[in-house]
Amino acid sequence: MTATEALHRAAQYLCTASKSFVPSEEDDSHTNLGWNAEEAVLATRPLNNEGLRLELNHAVYALDIVHPESGLSGSFPLTGAKHLDIIKWLDNEREFCGISRPYTFDLHYELGYSPVLDDHFTFPSMSGDALDAEIVRRNTADQAMKAILLERDTEALPRIWPHHFDSGALILQPTSKINSIGIGMAIPDGMIDDHYLYVSGYDSNGGLSTRGFGGLPHGKWYEEGWKGAAVSMTALSVEEALAFYRNAIEAYMHRP
């Protein structure tokens, strides 16, 4: 099991905590997560009026309950952690923190992993190098995405969606040729067997064709199936990531 796969599974506790305690949104945005580069954690939205959050700490490979003022309230190391024990711990912690609603682990999608996250699942140990690589990728994507969103004068922020474990943001640029541009970072999948950055444009009919677009200094255009630009994150610097986003977005904005 890779570090990405283990962390992706662990992020489901943040998702289900949000489902249990955060007012629901039709687009599931109440379950998406924020990345804190300084602390190297994924964090839920506030789980109660006091701002309590559940965090996935990449640096120490643990789940943390954190209060915005008093700090760490409880921590559960993931190495050797059993799925059922984590559920019991979370329900005990929410009661200790004064949340009256029970915590329920209830996913509304399949992750597609084997072994599945069920009563028999136990989290493996992870090397510090593997976890550090996860932190670097999240930091690179987060920094480049925030910079390009600032350049495009949008108030959107990158968010991590627990289903696909991708960082993403939407740039709304309504014109006669384009409605929006999606940017983000995806984990390895059937298209690219590596973490990768992506940019894709949309109009009212869906994904825009990339035919006729010029070459990119980093990455390439895809047309069959998914339409957009993508680049592997292996050895990719923040400056190169930003250049990729910038060049691909400009191509969409100036498409014929």
Image (spheres, rainbow, N blue to C red):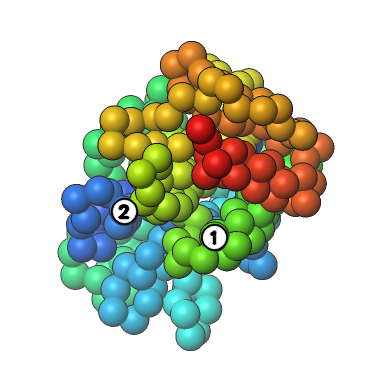
Query: In what element is the residue under mark 1?
Result: loop
Vertical arrangement, residue 190 with respect to residue 134, above or below: above
Identify which amino acid the numbered label 2 is placed on. Ser
Indicate left or right for 212 with 244 as reference: left
Q: CA distance from mark 2 to mark 1?
A: 22 Å
The percent position of residue 121, horizontal first and vertical second, equals 44, 31
The percent position of residue 101, horizontal first and vertical second, equals 18, 64
Quadrant of the snapshot with the N terminus: top right
Outermost residue toward the bottom in this view: 69
Residue at left offset 29%, top offset 30% = 205
Can residue 4 be seen here? The reply is no
Residue at left offset 52%, top offset 25% = 210
Q: Quadrant of residue 198?
A: top right
Q: Nearer the viewer, mark 2 or mark 1?
A: 1
Of labels 2 and 1, earlier in sequence is 2
Query: In what element is the residue under mark 2?
Result: helix
Can residue 248 be seen here? The reply is yes
Residue at left offset 28%, top offset 79% = 49
Vertical arrangement, residue 164 with respect to residue 11, above or below: above
Q: Which mark is residue 20?
A: none
Indicate left or right for 191 with 106 as reference: right
Mark 1 sits on what residue? 152
The percent position of residue 247, horizontal first and vertical second, equals 66, 42
Outermost residue toward the front in this view: 256
Badge 1 crowding class, 10 Å Cα cut-off, few under 14, some 14 to 19, many 20 or more, is: some
The percent position of residue 216, horizontal first and vertical second, equals 71, 32
Please state which of residues 156 and 62 is positioned toward the viewer in this rendering: 156
Residue at left offset 37%, top offset 77% = 51
Outermost residue toward the top in this view: 224
Mark 2 sits on what residue? 29
